[in-house]
Image: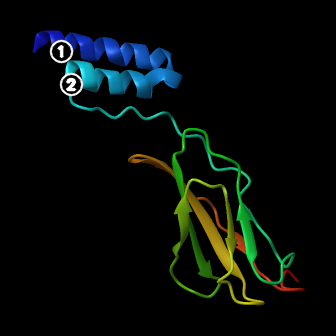
Amino acid sequence: MESQKGRGELLMQITRKNHGLWKAILLLNIIFWGLPACTVNEDLGSINNLRASKGEYNDYIKVEWDIVSGATYYILEKKKETDPAYGVATQGTMNIFEDYEAENMVKYLFRLTAKNGQDSVGPSEPVIGCRGANCGN
């Protein structure tokens, strides 16, 4: 058991220095040494440039944001401006969403959470979006 502990500590030292290889090394560790899996999370960056269209499209609202460093997926929430609570609009790996379910001339608030395993950043400050000509006025 002591030798496995020493190998695990060595593995952690290697992964700290070389983030790009940590997944492969961790997999090899599990396959060849039989050590239990451990979670190594990269630091998550911040949420930047979340934006939503305001009348540019007649049949949907386009929401997009800059890729968050270290994030493996995103949760985008929305609510009508007058609603009390948010609901999930979408979740996944893309940094763009087109909301075809939005009602015409209704303002929506969108906010974003970036995740990597149990680590998360957010939710962000909300942005307003709407569909239909003149909805941004």
Task: Tell me residue 127's x, y (percent).
Answer: 70, 68
Q: Is residue 40 left or right of residue 97?
A: left
Looking at the picture, does residue 46 appear above or below residue 107?
above
Task: Tell me residue 6's x, y (percent).
Answer: 22, 10
Looking at the picture, does residue 111 appear above or below residue 12?
below
Looking at the picture, does residue 28 appear above or below residue 90?
above
Dot 2 or dot 1, earlier in sequence: 1
Q: Secondary structure at mark 2?
A: loop
The residue lying furthest to the left in this view is: 1
Whether residue 90 appears in this view of the structure is yes
Q: Amino acid at mark 2?
A: Leu
Image quadrant holding the N terminus, namely top left
Q: Residue at x 51, y 46 (%)?
A: 72
Task: Tell me residue 33's x, y (percent).
Answer: 22, 18
Residue on which the image places disc 2: 35
Q: Amino acid at mark 1?
A: Gln
Q: Secondary structure at mark 1?
A: helix
Q: Are marks 2 and 1 in contact (CB under 8 Å)?
A: yes
Q: How many marks?
A: 2
Q: Nearer the viewer, residue 114 or 97?
A: 97
> Distance of mark 2 from mark 1, alpha carbons?
7 Å
What coloring was used for the rendering? rainbow
Image quadrant holding the C terminus, namely bottom right
Q: Is residue 84 left or right of residue 119?
A: right
Q: Residue at x 74, y 53 (%)?
A: 49
Classify residue 11 by image quadrant: top left
Badge 2 density bin: few <14, some 14–19, many ≥20, Cα 10 Å: some
Whether residue 75 appears in this view of the structure is no
Looking at the picture, does residue 12 appear above or below residue 120?
above
Task: Tell me residue 102's x, y (percent).
Answer: 68, 84
Q: Nearer the viewer, residue 101 or 129?
A: 101
Residue on which the image places disc 1: 4
